Image (cartoon, rainbow, N blue to C red):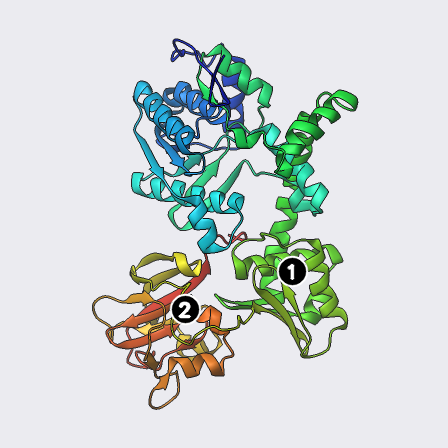
Amino acid sequence: MKSFGGRRILVFDECDLRMNAKDNRFIGNVLATIRRYDMLAPGDKVVAGVSGGPDSIALLHALYVLKDKLDISLHVAHLNHMLRGEAADEEAEYVQGLAARLGLPCTVEAVDVNEYAKNEKLSIELAARNVRYGFYRHIALDEGASKVALGHHAGDQAETVLLRLIRGTGLRGLGGIPPLRPLDPASGITVIRPLINATPVEIRSYCHEAQLVYYIDASNVSPVYLRNKIRHELIPHLEQDYNPRVIHTLSTTAELVQDDDDYISGRVCEMMGQITEVILPHEVIINIPALSRQHIAIQRRIIRQAVYELAGDLEDFESIHVEKVLELARSGKTGSRISLPGNLQARREYDRIILEWAEEEGFESALSEDSHPFEYVLRVPGDTEIVEAGITIEADIFNIEDKPGLLDTISLTDHNEAYFDLGVITGHITVRNRRPGDRLSPLGMKGHKKLKDVFIDKKIPRNVRDRIPVIIWGTEILWVVGVCVSDFAKLSPTTEKVLHLRARRRYLSCD
């Protein structure tokens, strides 16, 4: 054992690159986990997120040992968060060297997480997570990888369950960390966690056995973070005085809860269309009578799902906020409203609850200082991810004769979709956010109207307007997503080919 600047690292002369999967218990367990959850298929390209700690190093080595058996290829990815100076630089250099030794391609990048956290007004922990997952996503896209493998293990699972119990949670929270989850559904990229059933002791024992070098991040020991207090104080206390296998017990409990949660979530997703109307990206409408007819457990799930549809995550949205929305539905009067985390609000309008982005004071009518212009060429046909709006625009083309009656029913279509006469549109279609001077001719209206006035008429909060995608052909606005469809290129009796556009949440949990 050697020490560098207060950090402990194991140093061995040679790491064993020739571990036999059949003869090694740890490798066998990793393989069993991969097969149990159907994590990998022959031919998969996998991005392995490697920090340099024991978990990610064991993960990389295990996948390296199994790559021929599984018929997969690996790409190592390391992100330097620029939070720990020379120590972080040293770890980045080590990961790059280990990848080279294993004969694997490697991408190392650095991002100033502190700066990102300040700009986005986030905690360092959340900022680091956002940056890290964004990094893995873009590496996977660049490399054509379908999987991103991360080193979360049974210890992390136990900590997560305890952390959520302490803060208060429901069934989904008790499910902890999922073995698989979509990272980019539009591109088919999935996060996998092959070590989710391995304990910290098993992982470090494997590192010793395989003679693997790993680094200890001092921030993982600091008692400042609640998770670290759970890891280094609460879990050892539970192991010593209550259950020596508490990590295994909590991990198994999370697995059982995940199964129950998957089933209930499926049922809730089936009901969403009957109870809510999702108008991306600015509001979700909940029908109070339809909600009230459901069991209270389903009501709570509907509320959480509705918030997820709007915000794209449930960060800081806790059970107390669910109950506040339900109380608004039960006894609130028309015009009543409550504030929710993440600059959201819920207001009651007769027999509806409207979840929406709250207005921020001092927001200018043009692009705000915190907003950034974005512009994409729409893939037709295909999917175009609008990162800034948190949604994907799906485009497909069909002959109008294949959908008889479309002209008669088009007025009943969802806010999140629009149809256009492709015979009128030639060349590129772009997607961008609003620009000063934007005007359009709303469907059924003669003449043009300022987009700013459309937003005012529709009561779209000013602080949301910059993230709403605007679909443009030449100088014509075709569709302000979820807000207004243009009269230009509308379907008519002479239409032959139809362009169908649909907006959906990027990380839609009901997919």
Identify residue type, mark 1.
Answer: Ile
Task: Kindly indicate the quadrant of the structure image that contains residue 133.
Answer: top left
Which one is in front, 177 or 302? 177
Is residue 105 positioned above or below 120 on the image?
Answer: above
Query: Which residue shows up at 67% across the image and 53% down it?
Result: 318
Q: Which mark is residue 368?
A: 2
- Report whether residue 477 is seen: yes
- Left or right: residue 485 versus residue 164 is left
Residue at the extreme front: 5
Q: Residue 292 location in percent, x, y?
A: 73, 66
Task: Kindly indicate the quadrant of the structure image that contains residue 271.
Answer: bottom right
Distance CA(mark 2)–CA(mark 1): 30 Å
Residue at the extreme bottom: 446
Identify residue type, mark 2.
Answer: Ser
Task: Kindly indicate the quadrant of the structure image that contains residue 160.
Answer: top right
Around disc 2, counting alpha carbons within 10 Å, would you say few (fewer than 14), some (14 to 19), or many (20 or more)? some
Around disc 1, counting alpha carbons within 10 Å, would you say few (fewer than 14), some (14 to 19), or many (20 or more)? many
Is residue 295 positioned above or below 81 on the image?
Answer: below
Residue at the extreme right: 241
Secondary structure type for disc 1: helix
Which one is in front, 415 or 304? 304
Which one is in front, 301 or 345? 345
Query: Which residue shows up at 61% across the image and 59% down it?
Result: 341
Query: Which residue shows up at 54% across the image and 48% down it?
Result: 123
Q: Residue 261 location in percent, x, y?
A: 65, 45
Q: Residue 510 location in percent, x, y?
A: 54, 53
| Residue carrying label 1 | 303
- Report whether residue 415 is seen: no
Query: Which residue shows up at 63% across the image and 68% down it?
Result: 346
